């Protein structure tokens, strides 16, 4: 199905049908006087016809576009066909005599429209030849940057995790060393206390033996035992063994902050350079 003239892209003119009645060929030319698209064959016939041989027939892309037909609101019998250059508004021929536009320079609106259309065609050509392909290239480049950035960020995450594992292992090692230090101190203190406890046990046994001896002296069975009892009057009880309360170690917690730990895991910096 052929497209309407308003839908046709400038670089796809072959989609528009010839405007000659009963001709279904694709148009490639345009009559600026008739404002009619036509195929090559109809163009030839148009230029051979005495009534139309003087018409300006041009390639379709170079056509003059017809102005929208609109009546002047101030002068309803006149069509708008001029441009007041000073006011930059479309007017009709009668408007040139009004006080709003009297003495102003006016230009044929169709000519201005043709120049505008030509300018727009040039802009469209620039867009298609440079801006569109350049934008597509940039999209591809950005897509590549996205992939690269994801790889870089994943590598950074991996590095952080590796550093964290190293710090954890170091913490585990130091923890083991500290625990062993505590265990060693504990063994030493317990050995001291055990020695003191054994000394007290020995002393209690000594006291029990002494009590037994003294009780034996209270009822001597013979002169020998009596002699021992008499000598025991000057018996001196050994003093209680000295003991000392061990001084336990004191744990002082380390001082650190989140920032200190963060430093152990490295730094993430964004270079202060302008993007390419």
Image (tube, rainbow, N blue to C red):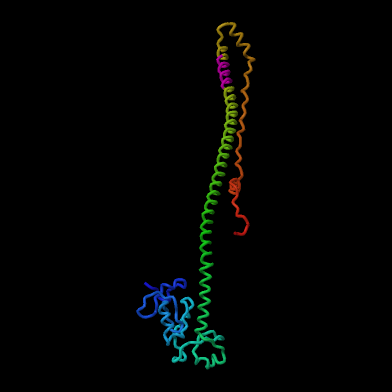
271, above or below 132, in the image:
above
Q: Is residue 66 magenta?
A: no
Q: Image point 60% across, 45% down: which residue?
A: 264
Q: Mostly what secondary structure, the magenta segment? A: helix
110, above or below 226, in the image:
below
Residue in front for this viewpoint, 261 or 165? 165
Q: Image point 57% across, 37% down: which residue?
A: 173
Residue in front for this viewpoint, 216 or 265? 265
Residue in front for this viewpoint, 54 or 215? 54
- Whole-percent x, y for residue 82 in the image: 51, 87
Q: Give the magenta range.
A: 201-212
Q: Which residue extends farthest front? A: 48
> Quadrant of residue 9 in the image?
bottom left
Is residue 20 toward the left or the right of residue 148 in the image?
Answer: left
272, above or below 171, in the image:
below
- Whole-percent x, y for residue 5 in the image: 42, 76
């Amino acid at each position: 199905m052929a497209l309407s003239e308003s839908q046709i892209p400038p670089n796809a003119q072959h989609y528009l049908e010839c405007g000659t009645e009963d001709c279904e060929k694709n148009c490639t030319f345009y009559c600026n006087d008739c404002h009619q698209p036509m195929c090559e064959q109809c163009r030839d016939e148009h230029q051979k016809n005495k009534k139309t041989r003087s018409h300006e027939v041009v390639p379709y892309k170079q056509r003059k576009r017809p102005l929208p037909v609109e009546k002047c609101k101030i002068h309803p019998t006149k069509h708008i066909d001029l441009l007041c250059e000073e006011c930059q508004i479309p007017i009709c021929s009668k408007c040139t005599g009004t006080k709003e536009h009297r003495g102003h320079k006016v230009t044929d609106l169709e000519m201005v429209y043709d120049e505008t259309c030509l300018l727009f065609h040039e802009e469209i050509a620039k867009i298609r030849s440079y801006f569109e392909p350049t934008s597509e290239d940039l999209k591809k480049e950005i897509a590549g940057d996205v992939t690269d950035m994801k790889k870089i960020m994943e590598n950074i995450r991996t590095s952080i995790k590796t550093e964290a594992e190293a710090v954890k292992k170091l913490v585990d090692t130091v923890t083991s060393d500290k625990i062993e230090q505590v265990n060693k101190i504990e063994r030493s203190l317990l050995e001291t206390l055990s020695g003191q406890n054994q000394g007290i046990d020995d002393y209690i046994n000594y006291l029990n033996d002494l009590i037994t001896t003294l009780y034996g002296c209270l009822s001597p069975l013979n002169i020998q035992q009596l002699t021992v009892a008499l000598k025991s009057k000057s018996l001196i009880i050994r003093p209680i063994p000295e003991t000392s309360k061990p001084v336990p170690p004191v744990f002082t917690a380390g001082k650190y902050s989140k920032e200190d730990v963060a430093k152990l895991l490295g730094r993430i910096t964004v270079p202060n350079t302008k993007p390419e």
